[in-house]
Structure formats: structure tokens, C-alpha cells
Image: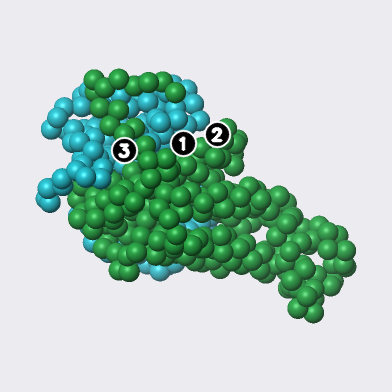
Chain colours: A cyan, B green
Amino acid sequence: MEERRKQLIDVALELFSHRSPEDVSIDDIATAAGISRPLVYHYFPGKHSLYEAAVRRAADELAGRFVEPHDGPLGGRLLRVMKRYFDFVDEHGPGFSALLRGGPAVGSARANAMIDEVRRAAYAHVLDHLGVASPGPRLALVIRSWVGLAETTALTWLEKRAIPREELELQLVHDFMALAAVTSAHDPETRGVVRRVVAQEPADGPLGDLVAHLATLAPGTEVSEP
Amino acid sequence: MEERRKQLIDVALELFSHRSPEDVSIDDIATAAGISRPLVYHYFPGKHSLYEAAVRRAADELAGRFVEPHDGPLGGRLLRVMKRYFDFVDEHGPGFSALLRGGPAVGSARANAMIDEVRRAAYAHVLDHLGVASPGPRLALVIRSWVGLAETTALTWLEKRAIPREELELQLVHDFMALAAVTSAHDPETRGVVRRVVAQEPADGPLGDLVAHLATLAPGTEVSEP
């Protein structure tokens, strides 16, 4: 019985991942699961509860991809997490977009709460990697902003896939440092974090050349085209 | 009649701005407007349509605050727009939060569409100030990301107002340049925009010291505490 429930969620998640939720019917789910429509209703009172169960599954799966050992420089760790994040986004594209954009058929309060939970998990993981237990409001805002930025970037990527995802994964790592660097002008805590992170980065790591690149943007400097 | 409709929207927007929409009843609106409940229903079939009319009004008002003359360096222009944006957020705090967070009582498809319209207006204004007509996908992503960042920052500010808004207004201007600077590592178009903008900035403008500040973050550099 629990097995059947689990199978139905698997099937539903697969369908919701590849089509917008409003385009998936209980009949589609029954057909894909090879069971009757009444049997689907036996396990889930309606599409809504099955959708929520699928979002629950997806949220847990995504949160699981944030887990990254605390080994080596931060840039490499963030980059590996970004790769897994884009893997997830790639696998669940249409469902991911529909869920985050909200809309008539989706956007239940419970599904929204699960999304917020994933955002908070992402936030907590970053904080943990930075080795900070109780951040001040400015560092907290940097991390939260960056989690939002990763969402916007992934959603934009899904629309047309006009930019290679590898480039965006690296860009998001750089974006994190750039946002932290800006905030560090006003905030000693963030400045301490940035300096500690930068000091541990190898020259050939994903953060290695960022500061040098930024310096080339000042007026009067020569820029070599890539 | 049109006058009465307009007055009701004024009253509703005022109430929705200071309380979460689910905490505002048609009775509250009737009382605040000094008219009877049936008369409210005469103009608006229900709270939902009045709420949408209020969101429409707010969306138009916010989009109006994006209008900024194309005079002087970009940093100052963006900073003035950010000040007006935070004025708006300040005036409509709880309603702004509820609307952008979605939730059970709000988040109609039509209200969501209006919010997206405002985001697109913000995007178009920035593009216009940059003097770019048809951006490539990377520059487009920078601007869109920044519009999202301004939202996250404003929402976070509203929660506890733990950071002075003037600091966040300036920070968002810096964030824009920082995101553009990161992307410019991969994108000649964005690099051209960044270099053009930086070249026009006065040393005492909001972007004047950003690059210098960023350079102080490299390992081994001395940092003077503020």
C-alpha cells in the first residue's frame, strides 16, 4: 500500500516535471501508472493532494542535492552544488518553472510553504559552509539574495536555454562573491567572510580570477577580448 | 460614478497597504469609505475584484516611479529610482509583502500578471538607460536578475527594517554593477556597457569607489575599517 502510494508519486512527479501541472490529469497519471482512475483516488483524494505529494518529493530531492562535504576551497564547493542544482532544474524543467512562477492551477499555500522550506535549506547550507552560526542582517541578506538569484537564473535558463548552463553555474559562484564583496563595504562581518574565502582560493579555482577581472573594468585599463 | 469607483480603489489600496489582504473585509472597506456594504458591491462584485483594481492602481503607481530623466551618470539615476522604489515599498509595506509572497487569499492569476508587468517595465527602463535596444541573453539576464534582487532586498528590509534603507538603496546600485561586472567576464556586450558606465561615473558618485573597494578584498591587501 505504501509502495503503491510511492509509485504514484513517482509517476506524478515524472509527469509534472515534463508538463505544466494544469496539463496533467488524473487520467494521465492512472494511465502512466497502469492502474485505474478509482484506484488513484483511493490513494489520493484529488489531483491537488497528489500534486502536493509530488512537490514534497521534489523539494526533499532538491534539498538533498545541497549537501556538500566541507572540504577544500568554497568556490569549488559552491560550483559542485550549482551543477547538481542545474541537474535538478534540467530534469524537472516545466514543473520547476510552473511551481516557482505560481499560476491558476498551482500555487497552493502548502506547495508555497515547501518551496520556502527549500530556500531556507539552501540558506542554512551556505551559512554552514561559511562557518557562520548567527549572521548579522547584512550577511543574511547576501545569502538570501543569492538564493533568489539562483532561482531567477535557473528560470531564465529554462525559457530558451540560450546560455550554456556550465557558464551560468560558474557565474552564480562569482555572483555570490560579488554580492558579498559589495555588502562588505558596509559590513565588517561580510568583509571578514570574503577575505577568508578569497585567501583560501587557488589561482585556478572558480574564484581565482574574479578580483583580477573586476580590476580590468576600471576606466583606462586595457581589456583583452576573450 | 467613475469618481466613486476611484474613491473605493483609493480606500481599498490604503487598507491593503497596511494590512494583509486576508485581514481586510468588504465591511472594512465600506466603513473606511463611509458608504454601505451593498454600495461597495454595486461597484465591485467582490473583494477579489476590488483587490485586483487596487493592485492595478499600485502597479501603475510603482511603474510611474521608474521614470527617470536620462541626465547625468547612470549611478545617480539608478540611486534616485531606488529611493523612489523604497518610498513605494515603505508606503505599501504589508500589501507589497503579501502580494509578492503570494498566499491563500492573494495570488490571483491576474494580480500575478500585473506584477510581471511591473517587472517588465523595470527591465525596459534599465535597458533604456543603458542605451541598449536588443540585448543579448547575458545582458538581459543581468537586468532581470537585478530586478529580482531589488524585490528580495525590499522584502527582506520590510520584515524587520534591520538595515537602514539608504544603505540598501546604494547597495542595490552597487549590486547592479557587480552582477554586470561578473557577467562581463563572459560577454563582450555587457563588458562594453560596464566600461561605458564606469567611464562616465564621477569619483564622488555612487559607483565611484566600488571598483577600488573590490580591489581591497584580494588577499594581502590592507583594509581600513570604516
Find the distance from the CA under tag 3 to the CA under tag 2.
Answer: 23 Å
Instruction: Determine whether the residue tagged by mark 1 lies in a helix, strand or loop.
Output: helix
* Quadrant location of the C terminus of chain B in the rendered image: top left
Q: Do labels 2 and 1 touch, CB within 8 Å?
A: yes
> Which of the two discs, 2 and 1, sits closer to the camera?
2
Question: Which residue type carries mark 1?
Answer: Leu
Question: Which residue type carries mark 3?
Answer: Val
Q: Residue at x 56, y 60 (%)?
A: B65
Q: Which residue is mark 2?
A: B163
Q: Disc 1 is attached to a residue of which chain?
A: A
Q: Disc 2 is attached to a residue of which chain?
A: B
Of labels 3 and 2, earlier in sequence is 2
| Crowd band around label 1 with a 10 angstrom C-alpha radius: few (<14), some (14–19), many (20+) | many
Q: Disc 3 is attached to a residue of which chain?
A: B
* Image x and y of residue A62, in percent: 34, 43
Q: Residue at x 45, y 59 (%)?
A: B71
Q: Which residue is mark 1?
A: A141
Instruction: Determine whether the residue tagged by mark 3 lies in a helix, strand or loop.
Output: helix
Question: Which residue type carries mark 2?
Answer: Ile
Q: Which mark is residue B211?
A: 3
* Image x and y of residue B100, in percent: 54, 53
Q: Residue at x 79, y 79 (%)?
A: B1
Quarter occupied by residue B61: bottom right
> Which of the two discs, 1 and 3, sits closer to the camera?
3
Query: In the visual, does A200 lie left or right of A177?
Result: left
